[in-house]
Structure formats: structure tokens, C-alpha cells
Amino acid sequence: MKKFKPTLFIAIVLLVFFFTCKNSFSTTVNVSVSSFQFSPASISVQVGDTVRWNWVNGSHTTTCDGSALTSRPAGAAAWSSSINSVSTTFAYKVTVAGTYNYKCVPHGGGGMVGVITASAPLVTLNLTALMEGFWNGSFTVQDTVRVYLRNQTSPYAIMDQAKIKLSSSGNGTLTFSSAPGGTYYISVIHRNSIETWCKNPQSFTAGTTKIYDFTTGAAQAFGNNMILKSGKYVFYGGDVVRDGTVDASDISKVDNDATLSLSGYVVSDLTGDDFVDAQDLSLVDNNAFNSVSSVLP
């Protein structure tokens, strides 16, 4: 008797897993058809999802063909199918965003209607970024950044934006509700750090998560515009006045606030310890001496 090869078994399992999961970002939404109603009568889905009507009792249809009481987005396929004891299910894959009004042909006039609201899949970014003064080699002070998705060609128009408080490892996941799938520059703005863009435009696929880690190398930033600190590449700190350059105006602001012993969540606190002191002044002075500034496409 031949032995079953483990490698063959593993290959089969992986193949099944691939075909099972390749559409894992789509969902099937079920609608029951009975008692002269669709239940639920109103559903929300994303493009790529499937709506399945399931017969419970009676003789009905699900119909969206442009006839009375029905409508669909331009470019969306029409449908009409009986739902009864013989034809118990019907499935429709949504391919166009918009509103679909459908009915049961024999009972639509009596109120047996339904609506599907379909939205485009969202673009998601898993981001890792660290700020120079906030990172101590083990963890970072948690703070908020605003992230922009920008057109890949000049003038690099903003296509969408989102804000997030990064974790103690500098990580966070952002969801963009307006930008469709496409290729974008990632631009990150922090309250007192140099604005930093990704090295090259990144491809985003709606319904999936893009991973981008700035901390792994200087080349992750446009113009290699980061500095190595305690094993991680970090955004330059010190742009207190947010003009894209660390210079005398930033030094003046930090120096004045340090003299006043300012504390709390203030823009001149470059280390995130809620105090403006000599550490903050040292950082801004050093980066001003080195003429640190933003490097953008």
C-alpha cells in the first residue's frame, strides 16, 4: 500500500484555502421572501457583495428591471427571478455603487418592495511611523497624525484624508471613505514634526488593507528624509510653526515656552512628556543647525 505523502496533503489544503479566501473581502447578505414581504426590506452592502433571496412561503419574484417601482444605478445589470417552492433562491452580485429599488411583481403594488444601498469598498491603510522626540528606543509617546492620500501626479491633489492616534509602537489603521482604489502618495503630518511623504506612489485596492512602514529604512520616505534613532527611522522633529523648515522661528517658540516652563499638550513639546524644557530646545536647535526641512515631490 502506498503511503500518502504529507507534502501532497499540505499542497491540497493550501489550494483549498486560497480559493476559499481569495474573495474574503466580499459578503453574502440574505433576504427572506415570505408573507408578502422581503425581510429585511432595506439592506446596505458594498460593491462585490452578493444579495441572496431565500424562499420561505408563497409565490413571489425579486425584480429590478426598470419597470414601475424599480430602479438601479447606471451600468448595473437588471434582474428578475421567481422565488417559490420550485425556485427557492436567487443570488445577485452587486457590481455598481448606488441605490437599487426592487419589487415582487405580483405583490409590489401591495407594498412588497425592497431597497439595496451599495457603497464602494473602502480603502484602508495600516501605517507605522515614529516621531524623533517621541521615540525612546522601546516605545513612543502616543500622539495623533493626519494622513493624506494624494494624487500621484503634480499638483498632487488631496484625494482623501484621515486622522488617527498611533499606538505606542507607532502603528495604526486608517480607513478612507472617499478615495477609490488607485495609486497615491501617502503624506503624514504631525503637530511638530516635518511633513513626510512615502518614497513612491503606493497602489491601494478597495476592500483590502495597504501596509506601509516608514520605520524600516530611510528610503521609505521621499528624499530619504528621515533620521535613524535607536534602531528605527523616524520623522524629523522641530517644525513647530508648520512651515516645512526647522529654523530660528521654531527655536524662538520653543525657547520662549521653555522660559515660561509651559506644560501640557502644547506644540512646542517636542518629546511628548508634557513639558517644554532643555530637551525640546536641544532637539529643535540641532535640527535647525542641520537645516532640516521637508522634501516633497
Image (cartoon, helix red, strand yellow):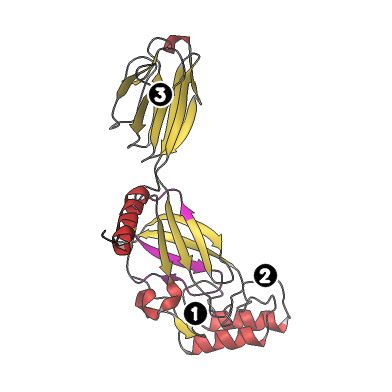
Query: Which of the numbered marks, if any, corresponds to residue 236?
Result: 1
In the displayed structure, does residue 138 sit left or right of residue 232? right
Residue 17 placed where, x, y %?
36, 53
Circle 3 sits on which residue?
101
Element marked by disc 1: loop
Name the front one of labels 1 and 3.
3
What range is drawn magenta here?
Answer: 175-199
Residue 180 or 169: which is nearer the viewer? 169
The secondary structure type at the circle numbered 2 is loop
Q: Quadrant of the C terminus?
A: bottom left
Q: How packed is label 1: few (under 14 Cα within 10 Å), some, or many (20 or more)?
A: many
Q: Residues within 10 Å of mark 2 (few under 14, many from 20)?
A: few
Q: Quadrant of residue 281?
A: bottom right
The number of callouts visible is 3
The location of residue 25, given as percent across then percent down, is 40, 48
Marks 1/3: CA–CA distance: 53 Å
Residue under circle 2?
265
Of the image marks 1 and 2, the number of the one nearer the N terminus: 1
* Cα gap from disc 1 to disc 2, whole angstroms: 19 Å
Question: Which residue is at a point 59% across and 88% down the rendered structure image?
Answer: 282
Q: Is residue 294 above or below residue 112?
A: below
